[in-house]
Amino acid sequence: MSTDLDELIKEVAAKHGVAVGRDDPIMILHTINQRLMQDSQKAQEEMLESFKSELEAISQRWGLDANDKAEKVLTASLNASKQSMEQLMQTATNQYLAKLKSEVDISINRLNYSLRDAYRISVLNILAASITIVGASVVIWLSIHH
């Protein structure tokens, strides 16, 4: 698992020029996506085992000819199930990516707002310091020339 994450981090850096750390939200999405695929695969395997058992019982009653037809049905069912799982996983991934993008955008906007406030405060501090220096200079100049 650790090697897979390291390879993924390297691939993201190579393809997109972006450094991604292990604690980056995109890595969380990757982990969630892997977990969803594993859970889905287990559920699909259980369903396929159940379906296969039923088909084997039927195929014993029908004989060799029916066995060939059952294999065709099983293959078609597997392909349809695989397509359905891929669509579900794609939809879930898109939803997670949209949510993650939204959260990242909100965080960036908050950071930009804070940076703008800090900049304004810095400018006001510099302005206040300049006024203070000018005022002190006037007081010193007046005290020297009076």
Image: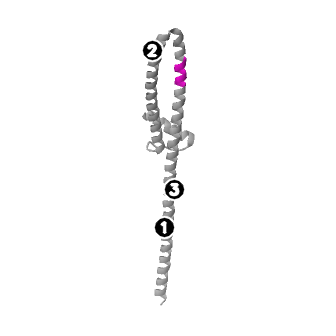
Q: Is residue 21 above or below residue 78?
A: below
User: In the rendered image, which quarter is residue 39 located in?
Assistant: top left
User: Residue at coordinates 53% horizontally, 31% vertically from top-left?
Assistant: 84
**Secondary structure mostly taken by the magenta-highlighted segment of the chain:** helix
Residue most extreme to the bottom: 146
- Residue 31 on the magenta segment: no
Residue most extreme to the top: 64
Magenta highlight range: 72-79
Picture coordinates of residue 90, whole percent (x, y): 53, 36
The disc at residue 57 is 2
User: Residue at coordinates 46% horizontally, 80% vertically from top-left?
Assistant: 136
Q: Secondary structure at mark 2?
A: helix
Q: Residues within 10 Å of mark 3 (few under 14, many from 20)?
A: few
Mark toward the viewer: 2 or 3: 2
Q: Which residue is mark 1?
A: 121
Separation of residues labelled 1 and 3 (CA atoms): 18 Å
Contact (CB < 8 A) between labels 2 and 3?
no
- Residue 74 on the magenta segment: yes
The disc at residue 109 is 3
Please name the amino acid that badge 2 sits on.
Answer: Ala
Q: Secondary structure at mark 3?
A: helix
Q: Is residue 90 above or below residue 25?
A: above
Question: Front-most of 52 and 91?
Answer: 52
> In the rendered structure, which disc, 1 or 3, sits on the residue that comes first in sequence?
3
Mark toward the viewer: 1 or 3: 3
The disc at residue 58 is none
Separation of residues labelled 2 and 1 (CA atoms): 79 Å
Please name the amino acid that badge 1 sits on.
Answer: Ile
Q: Secondary structure at mark 1?
A: helix
Picture coordinates of residue 2, whole percent (x, y): 43, 35
Please name the amino acid that badge 3 sits on.
Answer: Asn
Separation of residues labelled 2 and 3 (CA atoms): 62 Å
